[in-house]
């Protein structure tokens, strides 16, 4: 009779609304225990299991799950029924009581030795408890039972260990399993997956190879190999693995999507587009593929097609933030800064939050709403302290473009009081200080950078060029700094330009010409055009000088060096637009 009543109770819906079969008399009998007070002693004999079960059910209905767990666990100890142990396990997992869950799951697995869920749960809880030996035995039982979900069980185990266990402990668990069951490909794959998540790349590659040696065409393992090869920069090996996986499992959308993403990442956008169209054609509901296809269209410059797709995806809550952000990028690229700002402001909390705020500030700057941009920058520095340096630099650059050099220099001074000695801030303030005529600040900041990073080519070049520009009495020193920068960056047009300019300032225009020609050939920038034109003019090659200056003027007539040479050599700009 007890078994029949027990079976009827435990096969019902857990904590169903109301309690069928529990009337006023049993409820009043359990009122005190379920209310969370001291539990009354249960009756002895045949009534004890029924009492424990009724108290557990009533407590569960009232949300008193700890009370329910205690009674169901006691019931499981008294009644050798796997279904009771299963219910106790479920309650313990719900309240996150790992010790009681392990006790209940162990009883469940012993009473139902062919229950795959019981062995799976017990194995995970044993790992959590640090009993890797017992866990290995539990996995052995799964192997004996030929668990059809072994692969997914192990993948779920890896996900759990990745979030719950320290790196070395998780890897040790998988190493123990791999050593105990060396011929089980799924275990080696799971070990590789965990190792890849824990930045143990060598172990991940070795274990992936072992898994594939046992199952050569296994698409899931081939995808992992491809990802590991991409991380190592071996795109050829990654492509081979993906094409093999796709050939062996052509209808697998995950393989096809990863292959398309690989093609896009390696720059083969047209091939990526073909693959993604094929996936979407087979399954229009595959939003991962649709988002990837829209992103490829964006990169290909097919902005209207990308916009249509992103707009459709914005209705999917999973993709809304990414779609809104992408729509903002399209608006920004098409010059619709106001619309872009609205799209970026739609992006809420999540992984794209900072990028959206950052791009929104950029939209405000392009709209000329600089006061509002500065307010947002100040707020962002409070909200995203790890991005403070970047945000200070953006605000300083905006001020510099408005010719507010002193204000920008002061702002970076404030930033350096918060982050003393920060090299990027020092370098930026040095360049602004030069523009503001604060040459002592400029030199001090660049020397502070070089004290920390003596091989910094950018700082060496900046210091050398500034000395060449402003201190004719220190040209030898300037040349020394620029020569050091040139040794480190022999093909950098900015450094070549500086070296040509210091030679010209030292009265060596013919030697300077070769460096300036090379710099201009690499990067036809207005500043380099101004320098090259001046040297050509000095050497009497005036038509060529006019042509070079004309090119620089056409690109940016307001550039400082172009304006300087235009004032110094007005004959070189005859006929230029006013």
Image: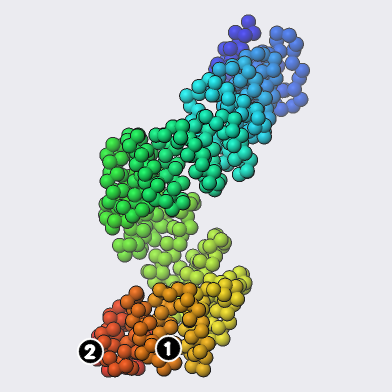
Tell me the quarter of the picture where residue 276 sits.
Answer: top left
**One can see residue 103 in this view:** yes
**Dot placed on the residue nearer the N-terminal end, 2 or 1:** 1
**One can see residue 413 in this view:** no
Looking at this rendering, what residue extends furthest in the front direction?
213
- Residue at which label 1 appears: 503
In the rendered view, tell whether residue 57 sits above or below residue 395. above
- Residue at which label 2 appears: 575
In the rendered view, tell whether residue 279 sits above or below residue 34. below
At which x and y percent is residue 275? 29, 44
The residue at 61%/70% (across/down) is: 418
Callout 1: SS: helix
Tell me the quarter of the picture where residue 551 sits.
Answer: bottom left
Q: Residues within 10 Å of mark 1 (few under 14, many from 20)?
A: many
Decide which of 95, 504 is in the foreground and name it: 504
Q: Is residue 573 left or right of residue 326?
A: left
The residue at 46%/32% (across/down) is: 214
Placement of the C terminus among the 4 image quadrants: bottom left
Q: Is residue 438 left or right of residue 77?
A: left
Q: Nearer the viewer, mark 2 or mark 1?
A: 1
In the rendered view, tell whether residue 371 sits above or below residue 201. below
Looking at this rendering, what residue extends furthest in the left direction?
575
At which x and y percent is residue 79? 67, 13
Decide which of 318, 149 is in the foreground and name it: 149
Callout 2: SS: loop
């Amino acid at each position: 009779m007890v078994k029949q009543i027990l079976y009827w109770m435990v096969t019902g819906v857990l904590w169903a609304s109301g309690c069928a079969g529990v009337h006023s008399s049993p409820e009043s009998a359990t009122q005190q225990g379920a209310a969370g007070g001291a539990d009354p002693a249960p009756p002895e004999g045949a009534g004890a299991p029924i009492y424990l079960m009724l108290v557990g059910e009533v407590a569960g209905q009232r949300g008193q799950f700890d009370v329910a767990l205690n009674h169901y666990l006691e019931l499981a100890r008294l009644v050798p029924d796997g279904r009771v142990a299963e219910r106790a396990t479920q309650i313990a997992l719900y309240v996150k009581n790992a010790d009681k869950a392990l006790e209940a799951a162990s009883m469940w697995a012993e009473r139902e030795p062919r229950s795959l869920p019981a062995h799976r749960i017990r194995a995970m809880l044993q790992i959590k408890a640090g009993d890797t030996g017992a866990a290995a035995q539990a996995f052995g039982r799964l192997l004996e039972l030929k668990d059809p979900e072994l692969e997914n069980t192990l993948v779920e185990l890896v996900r759990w260990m990745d979030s719950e266990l320290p790196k070395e402990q998780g890897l040790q668990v998988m190493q123990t399993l791999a050593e105990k069951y060396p011929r089980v490909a799924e275990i080696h794959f799971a070990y590789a997956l965990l190792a890849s998540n824990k930045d143990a790349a060598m172990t991940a590659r070795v274990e992936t190879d072992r898994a594939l040696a046992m199952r050569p065409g296994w698409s899931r393992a081939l995808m992992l190999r491809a990802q590991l090869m991409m991380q190592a920069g071996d795109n050829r090996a990654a492509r081979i693995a993906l094409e093999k996986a796709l050939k062996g499992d052509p209808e697998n959308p995950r393989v096809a999507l990863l292959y398309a993403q690989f093609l896009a990442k390696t720059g083969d956008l047209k091939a990526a587009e073909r693959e993604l169209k094929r996936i979407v054609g087979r399954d229009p509901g595959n939003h991962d593929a649709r988002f990837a296809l829209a992103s490829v269209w964006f990169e290909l410059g097919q902005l209207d097609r990308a916009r249509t797709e992103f707009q459709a995806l914005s209705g999917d809550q999973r993709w809304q933030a990414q779609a809104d952000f992408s729509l903002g990028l399209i608006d920004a690229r098409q010059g619709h800064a106001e619309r872009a700002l609205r799209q970026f402001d739609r992006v809420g909390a999540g992984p794209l939050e900072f990028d959206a705020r950052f791009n929104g500030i950029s939209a405000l700057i392009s709209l000329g709403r600089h006061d509002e941009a500065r307010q947002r920058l100040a707020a962002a520095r409070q909200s995203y302290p790890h991005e403070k340096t970047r945000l200070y630099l953006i605000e300083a650059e905006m001020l510099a473009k408005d010719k507010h050099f002193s204000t920008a220099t002061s702002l970076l001074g404030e930033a350096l009081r918060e982050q003393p000695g920060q090299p990027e801030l020092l370098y930026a303030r040095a360049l602004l200080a030069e523009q503001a005529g604060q040459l002592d600040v400029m030199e001090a900041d660049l020397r502070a950078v070089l004290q920390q990073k003596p091989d910094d080519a950018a700082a060496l070049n900046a210091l050398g060029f500034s000395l060449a520009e402003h201190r004719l009495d220190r040209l030898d020193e300037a040349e020394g700094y620029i020569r050091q920068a040139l040794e480190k960056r022999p093909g950098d047009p900015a450094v070549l330009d500086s070296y040509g300019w210091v030679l010209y300032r030292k009265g060596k225009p013919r030697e300077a010409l070769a460096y300036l020609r090379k710099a201009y050939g690499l990067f036809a920038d207005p500043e380099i055009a101004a320098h090259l034109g001046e040297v050509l003019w000095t050497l009497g090659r005036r038509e060529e000088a006019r042509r070079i200056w004309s090119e620089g003027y056409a690109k940016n007539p307001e550039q400082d060096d172009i304006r300087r040479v235009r004032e110094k050599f007005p004959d070189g700009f005859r006929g230029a637009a006013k």
